[in-house]
Image: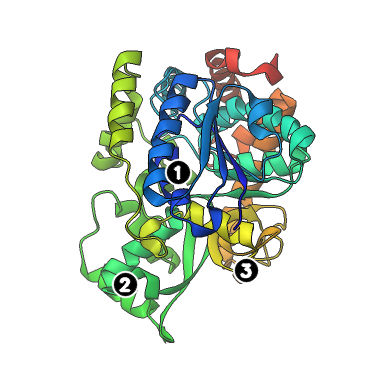
Amino acid sequence: MGRKKIVCLGGGSYYFGETLSDLAVREGLKGSEIVLYDIDLERAELMAKCGRRLSEEAGADFKIYATKSLPEAVDGADFVIANIGGVGGGGGGYYSSPVHVNDLHICAKYGVYQIIGDTCGPAAMMGAFRTIPVYMDICLEMERRCPNAIFINHANPMAILCRAIIKYSGIKNVIGICHGVQSGIRYIAKILEIPPEELETIWIGTNHYYWFIKIYHRGKDLYPELKKRISLQKAESNKILSTKLSQIYGYQITYPHDSHIIEFYPFLSHVREVSDLSPELDKEYKERSQRKPGSREAVMKDFKEFLDKVTLPQERESLASLESLGKLIEAIALGKRHIHIVNIPNQGAVSNLPVTAILEVEGVTNSFGVRPVYMGEAPLVLKGHLERIIAWQELVVDAGVKGDRNIALQALMLDPQAIPPEKAEKMFEELLVNSKEFLPQFK
């Protein structure tokens, strides 16, 4: 058995309901110790209670408990799973936190509309600045108490946070987990009328921005058929931009939701209102920019109802499980070779992109962690876009760790939605004021 100590940071977040469910059904993890760490101990205790129920139902024999002490949580850990992306959340999480919603309004004031603001653009940059100090403190404690632990990150901005840990801490075994690629495979599988697990695909890109390079089924190239079928159907209302870009580039966008894709381009900084570009994006922007966290009572009521509905997974090994975090941890714990979709340093997987860049690739597991599978070269048109994004990510990492205003401004100038320097400086100062209590590095 692979009995391990698995720590869940931000253990009171919704994410760990599915995570504990997935861990509980892994035979190789029976008898493991699961620690839920959260500054909101009440939520962590409720999640621990849910975990104990799932453990009993699955016969996992887990030892599960919650703590508000970070040193206690990470001491002797084998795996540390982090889902702390809502710094300043006010109880409502990242996307409905007042500080994030205010970021969206400040950006819009200067003509930079952000629909989601968790991966790129100035709102994502500020999210990174708020989260990086927390992650650095966690890594410092891990260096003391579990220096060889594997750090698994689920929070956004994914690539930036993973890169910050690797570049500026002693914790080097870092894996980012997302489900964008899996969702994209499902999307094209539905169009092709083929089970998603039967498709053989190669994609290239960084978190939330990647493109299919090859699509095969049982040795047959299905890219021509996919292009044909897409050209004959009307684009879905939330995939109009991605459909057009895929046609122009000749490569299908892997995660084809316009709300993510558009933030990698300058289009929204060229309109007076989001509705000038897309009714669907305008609808989502208005919904997100008007979010407010609920009362503590309402939030806890919803959380308890959610936990009551968490069940053991019905499908464990296919794309149906999307992120398959339990399978990944089990494979590493037992030293098994499995293929997983992960965010890790490139290390030559895409030979014409920087080796240190955090890319979303296929990786093969062993007892040391996971290493990337060779994906090929990025076509020139994609390479150009990706190199700019990767450089922007690096600047955000450096500014976020050092608290360097000038490097942050350099990132804003490199951002696809860049605005004139004078306006960018004013916008940045407003964004800093909005997050001042969460930015110790900028004081």
Q: Quadrant of residue 91?
A: top left
| Res. 373 mark | 3
Query: Is residue 147 left or right of 150 when viewed as pictured?
Result: right
Q: Is residue 420 visible?
A: no
Mark 2, residue position: 195
* Image quadrant occupied by the C terminus: top right
Q: Report x, y in % for residue 145.
A: 75, 34
Q: Position of residue 131 (x, y in %)?
A: 59, 28
Q: Are marks 3 and 2 in contact (CB under 8 Å)?
A: no
Where residue 295 appears, as percent x and y from the top left, is 32, 14
Q: CA distance from mark 2 to mark 1?
A: 27 Å
- Going by the numbered disc 1, the residue's amino acid type is Leu
**Circle 2: is it few (<14), some (14-19), or many (20+) Cα within 10 Å?**
some
Q: Is 310 rendered above or below residue 190?
A: above
* Mark in front: 1 vs 3: 1
Q: Residues under labels 3 and 2: Cα distance?
A: 23 Å
Q: Is residue 141 visible?
A: yes
Q: Which mark is residue 20?
A: 1
- Nearer-the-camera pick, 365 or 246: 365
Which amino acid lies under the numbered mark 3 shown in the image of this protein?
Val
Residue sitting nearer the eye, 194 or 74: 74
Q: Residue at x 36, y 79 (%)?
A: 224
Q: Where residue 428 appears, x then y in whole percent?
A: 58, 21
Crowdedness near tag 3: few (<14), some (14–19) or many (≥20) residues, C-alpha within 10 Å: some
At 28% from the left and 49% from the top, the residue drawn is 238
Q: Label 1's element?
A: helix
Q: Secondary structure at mark 2?
A: loop
